[in-house]
Image: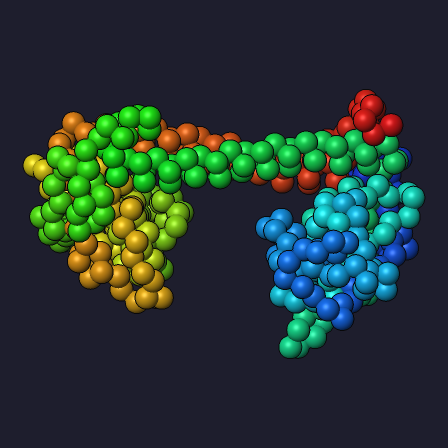
Amino acid sequence: MLQNETTLPDGFQMTELGPLPKEWRVVRLGEAVKLTKGRKPDELIPKYQFGALPYLTADYFRNRLPTEWVPAQYLSKLPLCSKEDVVLIWDGSKAGQVFIGLEGVLASTMVRIDPEKQIERHYLYYFLLTQFDLLNSKTTGTTIPHVNKEVFRNLPIPLPPLPEQRAIAHVLRTVQRAKEATEGVIAALKELKKSLMQHLFTYGPVPVGAKNFSPQRESEIGPIPAHWRVVKFDQAITRATRVPKVKQSDYQPIGLVPIIDQGQSFIAGYTDKSPYKDNLPVIVFGDHTRVLKFVDFPFVAGADGTQVLIPNSTLFDPLFVYYALSTIDIPSRGYNRHFSLLRESSLPLPPLDEQREIARMLQAVDAKIAAEERRRAALEELFKTLLHQLMTGKVRVKGFHLPELE
């Protein structure tokens, strides 16, 4: 039953989508857009040649790295896309996913969505972002799923006046660009850390310009400073026993004690079991995943494939051991166990003061990465909130001055 008109906020009307501003309209998407399906070219080439255009696959949109090109002689017979065109995956497991921002040849699994003049392209893109779950859950086809054309055509789209559509798109694009810039910073910091680790474990904690003045020697783990030693894994680390563990099915979203397991997330869940708190800090190694975690607080371990490692505190700084283990390349055995491979390795043993300096330098980079990842998460949450509130009129940008769009 529709909400009584008298209970609506001032300036709102009741629609099939719920309360919307009175100057907004609701139309069926099929009445306001035209679809153009992509086609498979007669020839695809792996490298660019003069006049060729990239083939717009979903991977290209996601990674921004073209892997296939369409030679110039075929372009006139194929549907093309500009950077302003809205493109949607029509066929496949990700049917309903939407993209914008690249030019090239429309892939055979995609459609280009051309709106009428009443719809701003970027506004349409952001609207379709909110429809992925619906489109992806109502596909047709058994072997290869396809977007249901009737479901797509009957989607009700809220249409503010064109200036407000532009303002909504501008706000969302600003947040999205800030998130993308943050992702660029994170990628650069990770590359910096990779280079820094290679330098520190080859030359020690000396400035890059002074590496030629650091005497070296060859060892079983590669070149290291001449005064460093190398020790076997069992001299550096012991494996903890009697570690409290909990099955994944018993993980809780809240609880007194964090659960550390072999997954990518640092904390996998919570429990109220008594924690492991001996010999902290320790290093958690994922026997199946090869993931390493430095843990300096009481915790309970995940029951599946979680190895708890105790560094030899007489010889090593624990954080240095964590970073040293991170440099070891353990070949993947799939979902088999890997601890036996790790145990065959050897570790560098610098003087303790150098260990601490190396750990301090790498920890500083990790702290910066963590700060940027928190910023990225906050921007992602802001984007999701704004996307919902702007598309429902709960937050208005009516009257925003956007000179670059005028």
Give the camera-side residue of 88 and 267. 88
Give the camera-side residue of 353 and 25. 353
Residue 68 visible? The answer is yes
Residue 155 visible? The answer is no
At horizontal 75% and vertical 61% (from top left) the residue drawn is 71
Quarter occupied by the C terminus: top right
Q: How many marks?
A: 0
Identify the image quadrant of residue 379.
top right
- The location of residue 300, given as percent across then percent down, is 25, 48
Identify the image quadrant of residue 19.
top right
Identify the image quadrant of residue 137.
bottom right
Whether residue 339 is situated above or below residue 122 in the rendered picture: below
State the residue lying farthest toward the front: 212
Give the camera-side residue of 340 and 268. 340
At horizontal 18% and vertical 45% (from top left) the residue drawn is 218
Judged left or right of residue 220, residue 332 is right
At horizontal 86% and vertical 43% (from top left) the residue drawn is 119
- The location of residue 173, given as percent across then percent down, is 70, 35
At horizontal 22% and vertical 37% (from top left) the residue drawn is 320
